[in-house]
């Protein structure tokens, strides 16, 4: 209906081309462009855009218009006080500090006053100032192309002085095409139109007579940015949904961890290089954490000589285990600490049942910050405990998991972790980037499971989640994940 209305305006005014201002006498302004776009899609009109520079007075410029330029304010002051000169040092009573220098310079440049022995001496107090005149003119007519060269120079100066800024304005005209001209030769009948079908329309039968307007989803509209979750939160949610749909249950564990849970229980020897300063954040407060004594003894035996309750199951690491090291506190370096805490928490009865759990959380490593390293990042970790689960099952599950996260090509290669055997690393293929390492996995070693009294095999995997988030969001710098750049957040 609006389209017909607009064409009817052309028909009645017998004009061929009209701008938005003219048309707004006949139609609401917001509707004009939308309607014109629709008509131009039907080749009935052309939209002609004209970019034009306009000068807009700044807040300061408006003030000047009201009170005069700083140099004028000096002149006014002198006039009111029947003077024709003033010491420079007294200017601070009339002007702001930052106006003084410019005012002095301009008085001299414009030949309005001279400076003699620290005094400003005016030739005349009633002078015309081109800058003031032009400022007033621009307020009336901001279109730059209506000013001549000399005026433009002045405008340039007003801009430098901060009284104006130059903006670009797009002027749009709507012009009938040949097809449009043909169309308006015939009478235009405007029928009642339904844009939103209501219950009353349906019951009352109005739908039968009125024209029901179809949607045109191609009409450009202003972009809107609805409120949304941070992309990282969104991906965490997505991963959780995938894992929950695969039958996993979520677990959590503390960020401040003892070396015992972060390393010892995982059969990482106490002199393992990963514990060294460069990787682990050791905490000053609290210095020590609680460690279950019974388990501590078992873990100590396994580390020292590979025995469990006096039974030798492994070579062990053959060194002197230090219980004080176990109690030291660290920021957890991996979420495997959560998995192992979960296994240790199972009662005898629960140990008879199968378990599938996962944990997503922050982990910390003392690494130099660069495009792919942050000292704090996310990991997502999962375990499956059940009779007869095998390494093949692990590969199958990981393939499924990675596929569901949107990675189609996945490959595995052997790897080493102190707590799993066999171990593997999974890589995913990304178009244009090649193979990228994404996760580590394996079957917990007997040295890990036996002290916990777990007899069933346990599959475990840990995924570098921040990395995954980067890949999914198409970022090349991990720092961008946390920069909270609003433009990026709006779009992503
Ligand atoms: N925790 C290991 C990943 C891993 C988890 C579970 C099993 C094997 C490996 C890491 O941080 O790199």
Image (tube, helix red, strand yellow):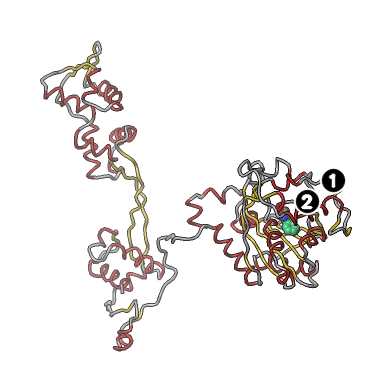
Q: Residue at image x 88%, y 56%? A: 314
Q: Farthest top residue?
A: 117
Report if residue 417 is visible in the image: no
Examine the image and state in which quarter residue 172 appears: bottom left
Residue 289 at x, y percent in the picture = 66, 49
Residue 168 at x, y percent in the picture = 36, 47
Q: Which residue is mark 2?
A: 268
Image position of 80 (left or right of 408): left
Task: Label 2, secondary structure: give it.
Answer: loop
Where's ligand 1: which quadrant?
A: bottom right
Residue 487 at x, y percent in the picture = 48, 52
Report if residue 303 is visible in the image: yes
Q: Residue at image x 70%, y 66%? A: 346
Number of residues whose C-alpha sits closer than 10 Å to that of mark 1, classed few (under 14), some (14–19) or many (20 or more): few
Number of residues whose C-alpha sits closer than 10 Å to that of mark 2, classed few (under 14), some (14–19) or many (20 or more): many
Image position of 106 (left or right of 401): left
Image position of 129 (left or right of 304): left
Earlier in the chain: of badge 1 and badge 2, it is: 2
Residue 205 at x, y percent in the picture = 30, 89
Q: From the viewer's perspective, is residue 107 above or below residue 212?
A: above
Q: Residue at image x 80%, y 72%? A: 388
- Nearest the viewer among 366 and 78 is 366
* Tag nearer the camera, 1 or 2: 1
Q: Which residue is mark 1?
A: 319
Q: Evaluate if marks 1 and 2 touch, with contact meaning CB atoms under 8 Å apart.
A: no
Image position of 435 (left or right of 24): right
Task: Label 1, secondary structure: give it.
Answer: loop
């Amino acid at each position: 209906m609006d389209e017909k209305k607009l064409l009817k305006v052309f028909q009645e005014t017998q004009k061929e081309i009209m701008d938005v201002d003219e048309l707004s006498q006949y139609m609401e302004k917001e509707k004009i462009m939308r309607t014109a776009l629709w008509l131009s899609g039907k080749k009935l009109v052309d939209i002609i855009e004209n970019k034009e520079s306009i000068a807009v007075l700044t807040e300061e410029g408006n003030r000047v218009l009201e009170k005069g330029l700083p140099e004028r304010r000096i002149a006014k002051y002198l006039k009111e006080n029947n003077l024709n000169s003033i010491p420079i040092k007294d200017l601070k009573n009339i002007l702001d500090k930052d106006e003084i220098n410019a005012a002095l310079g301009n008085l001299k440049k414009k030949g309005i006053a001279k400076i003699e022995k620290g005094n400003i001496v005016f030739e005349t107090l009633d002078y015309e100032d081109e800058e003031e005149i032009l400022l007033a003119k621009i307020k009336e007519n901001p279109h730059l192309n209506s000013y001549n060269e000399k005026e433009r120079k002045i405008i340039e100066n007003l801009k430098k002085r901060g009284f104006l800024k130059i903006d670009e304005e797009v002027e749009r005209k709507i012009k009938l095409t040949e097809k449009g001209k043909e169309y308006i030769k015939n009478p235009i009948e405007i029928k009642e139109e339904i844009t939103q079908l209501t219950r009353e329309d349906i019951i009352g039968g109005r739908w039968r007579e009125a024209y029901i307007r179809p949607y045109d989803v191609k009409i450009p509209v202003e972009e809107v940015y609805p409120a949304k979750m941070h992309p990282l939160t969104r991906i965490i949610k997505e991963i959780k949904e995938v894992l929950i749909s695969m039958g996993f249950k979520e677990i959590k564990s503390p960020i401040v961890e003892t070396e015992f849970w972060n390393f010892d229980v995982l059969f990482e020897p106490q002199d393992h290089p990963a514990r060294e300063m460069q990787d682990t954040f050791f905490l000053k407060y609290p210095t020590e954490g609680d460690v279950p004594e019974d388990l501590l003894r078992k873990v100590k035996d396994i580390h020292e000589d590979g025995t469990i309750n006096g039974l030798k199951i492994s070579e062990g690491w053959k060194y002197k285990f230090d219980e004080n090291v176990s109690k030291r506190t660290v920021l957890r370096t991996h979420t495997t600490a959560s998995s192992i805490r979960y296994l240790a928490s199972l009662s005898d009865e629960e140990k008879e049942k199968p378990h599938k759990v996962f944990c997503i959380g922050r982990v910390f490593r003392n690494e130099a910050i660069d495009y792919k390293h942050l000292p704090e990042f996310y990991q997502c970790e999962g375990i499956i405990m059940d009779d007869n689960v095998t390494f093949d099952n692990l590969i199958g599950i990981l393939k499924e998991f990675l596929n569901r996260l949107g990675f189609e090509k996945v490959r595995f290669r052997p790897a080493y972790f102190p707590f799993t055997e066999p171990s593997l690393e999974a890589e995913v293929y990304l178009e244009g980037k090649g193979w990228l390492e994404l996760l580590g996995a394996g079957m917990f070693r007997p040295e890990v499971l036996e002290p916990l009294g777990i007899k069933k095999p346990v599959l475990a995997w840990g995924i570098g989640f921040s990395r995954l988030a980067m890949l999914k969001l198409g970022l090349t710098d991990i720092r961008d994940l946390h920069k909270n750049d609003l433009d990026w957040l709006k779009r992503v």
